[in-house]
Image (tube, grey):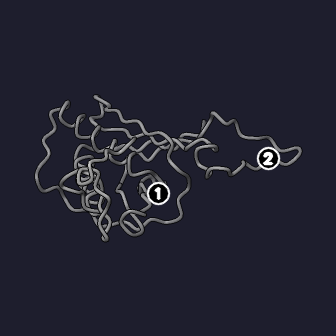
Amino acid sequence: MAIYELDPVDRIGIAAVGEPGRRRFFLLATGSGRTLTLACEKSQVQALILRLNQMLEAQKIEQPELALEQASMEPGEPEWQIGEMGLGYHEARQMFVLVASQAAAREAGEAGEAAEPAEPGEEEPPADDPPSVRFWLSQQQVVAFSKQAEAVLTAGRPLCPRCGLPMDPSGHPCPVMNGARPIF
């Protein structure tokens, strides 16, 4: 498995491109002389923020109300789609490590899109061996990243005060108002 290290990360952030409701999300990082843009899902960012906040609390790291503001980073062409993310804390270094692994080919492609077969004589890369990146973050970087990512997420569509679902500028069919419940 190809594992890349950004140790330490100079800058890390989340960017969203597009109109609210149709945005694409990216994890952006620079460090170790490299700049990375990785595509991700909004739900992955939400889960990451939740876990980061839990880990900060578990490590008893205070989160100031006003974190240092980072300059916004513009996403380039993503190198790959994130399939899985993991988060850990290295006690001896007092640093967090965020691991992002590429989505499997069947996850990264769109529905109905077949993977291209390898040319004769070419070896196919193992399907269960996606590349990964380890991002090493200081405690202050984690706090700033968490706040920045939350700001990006909240800049999307406003939530309906009745049902909690996102509202489009033209409104939305609120299940609370018509008695129907959403089916998940």
Q: Give the mark, 1 or 2, whose residue is nearer the N terminus.
A: 1
Q: Residue at x 29, y 66 (%)?
A: 171
Disc 2 on helix, strand or loop? loop
Residue 119: give its label: none
> Which residue does the numbered mark 1 point to in the structure image?
33
Q: Is residue 31 above or below residue 85?
A: below
> Could you classify mark 1 by the number of other residues whose Cα lies within 10 Å: few (under 14), some (14-19), or many (20 or more)?
few
The foreground one among 23 and 125 is 23
What amino acid is at disc 2?
Answer: Pro
What is the quadrant of residue 151 in the picture? bottom left
Image quadrant holding the C terminus, namely top left
The spot of residue 140 in percent (x, y) is 22, 48
Residue 89 lies left or right of residue 147; in this view the side is: right
Residue 154 lies left or right of residue 128; in this view the side is: left
What is the quadrant of residue 120 in the picture? top right
The spot of residue 160 in percent (x, y) is 23, 57
Q: Residue at x 23, y 35 (%)?
A: 54
The foreground one among 29 and 150 is 150
Mark 1 vs mark 2: give the one in front: 2
Disc 1 on helix, strand or loop? loop
The foreground one among 177 and 40 is 177
Q: Is residue 50 above or below residue 160?
A: above
Camera sees residue 81 = yes
Image quadrant holding the N terminus, namely top right
The spot of residue 14 in percent (x, y) is 36, 57
What amino acid is at disc 1?
Answer: Gly
Q: For the residues marked 1 and 2, what is the alpha-carbon distance in whole angstroms?
A: 34 Å
Camera sees residue 30 = no
> Which residue does the numbered mark 2 point to in the structure image?
117
Mark 1–mark 2 contact, CB under 8 Å?
Answer: no
